[in-house]
Image: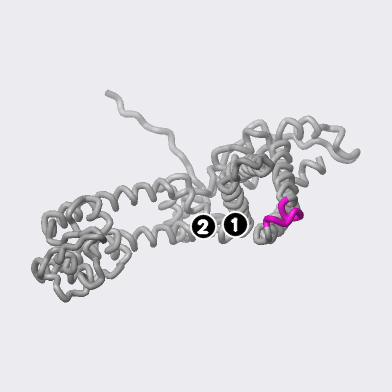
Amino acid sequence: MMYLRSVSCRVFVYIYDLIILVNAVFIGLDEENPLISNAEWVFLALYLLEILLKLYTWEPRAFFSKNQFWNWFDTVIIIAALIATIANWALKSSAVYTSRQILDIVFILRVFRLIRVVDSIKRFRAIINTLIKIWPTILTFGQLILVVYYIFAMVGMELFKNKVHFYAPDSTDPDKEYCGNSLLKGTTFAKNNYCKNNFNDVASSFILLLELTVVNQWHVLASGFTAVTHVSARIFFVLFHIVVVIIIINIFVAFVLEAFFVEYTVDKSDLQTSLEKKIEELELNFSLDEPGPNLVEAIETNDDDLGPSQTPKEKPSLMFKIASRRYKTVDGLLQRMFEADLSLDDIDEDDENPTFSNPVFGSV
């Protein structure tokens, strides 16, 4: 029992965090040094030992559950690093084949291990967990951006198609200096050779809109297309900036920030129903977020493990599952966001002593 519990304690986590930091120092040292290269096998053995201990403690099904992202991450990275290191060692012993590409993969996988330290820092862990949990929202946001881009790309092609031409670098055409349009002579657009930024096709339009999104020389691009058309063409670029940069991007950034604050303070909320409080007071609740005992722990924990003055505590035959305080959907996230604006004073006093009347059905 002492052995099994030691894997779950914070000391075990701190020890492996220290091992990762020491490994980070070795990563920056000379790989050609035999001591450094052999140390890689020591670190791999320690990481594999950690995974095996956790698998033995929590069982594979609990260890690889869908909400255990870091367990999946550790296992994939360590196994991939082990395979790449073995392949690199085998190829190094061969005199006819260079193993530089495999070695580069090993270096990348070694650096990826440092990401594990993020999980030990609460603020960093909150950021990663937020990004993992809102990825469906990120996909929805990407679809919205794609639709808006496509609309502006089609409008831009109607307004500015073939107004600007791009010439190959080895072209000797004299029109190359002003992008094939004499109206661009002497403009900053032509001097900076922005001829490739045009609305002549869908791909070029999307690239140009992306540059406008990150406000890369926004005024130069707008001035160039204004010069070849009309001063009112600036309306197109101003409208795109307002819709995409000011509205959509800022709303998404605000959503991500609010989601981060909710994730960081999710365990500090004061809002809880009276029923949940009562169940917890009676110790009739259980949570699925915490891994249950595995088969080994269940076998080893018997009445003989108790002292002479201790008796096994009988568990109630009826237990209640309290829903996790963490959100799993966008709706749950929004609910958590607005819960922070509520206080216990906002709850009706009748909620403290809820009564439920029998339903009355009307006769036909």
Quadrant of the drawing holding the N terminus? top right
Percent coordinates x, y for residue 271 in the rendering: 51, 55
Amino acid type, label 1: Val
356 shown above or below 16: above
Say which of 320 and 325 sits in front: 325
Q: Residues within 10 Å of mark 1 (few under 14, many from 20)?
A: some
Q: Which residue is mark 1?
A: 118
Is 189 positioned to the left or the right of 347 in the image? left
Say which of 216 and 70 sits in front: 216
Magenta segment boundaries in residue numbering: 31-37
Q: Which residue is mark 2?
A: 127
Amino acid type, label 2: Ile
Percent coordinates x, y for residue 346 in the rendering: 44, 59
Residue that sits furthest to the right in the current view: 308
Q: Residues within 10 Å of mark 2 (few under 14, many from 20)?
A: some
Percent coordinates x, y for residue 10 in the rendering: 72, 53
Is 13 positioned to the left or the right of 223 in the image? right
- Secondary structure of the residue carrying tag 1 is helix
- Residue 277 part of the magenta-drawn span: no
Q: Quadrant of residue 285?
A: top right
Quadrant of the drawing holding the C terminus? top left
Residue displayed at 38% across by 61% down: 253
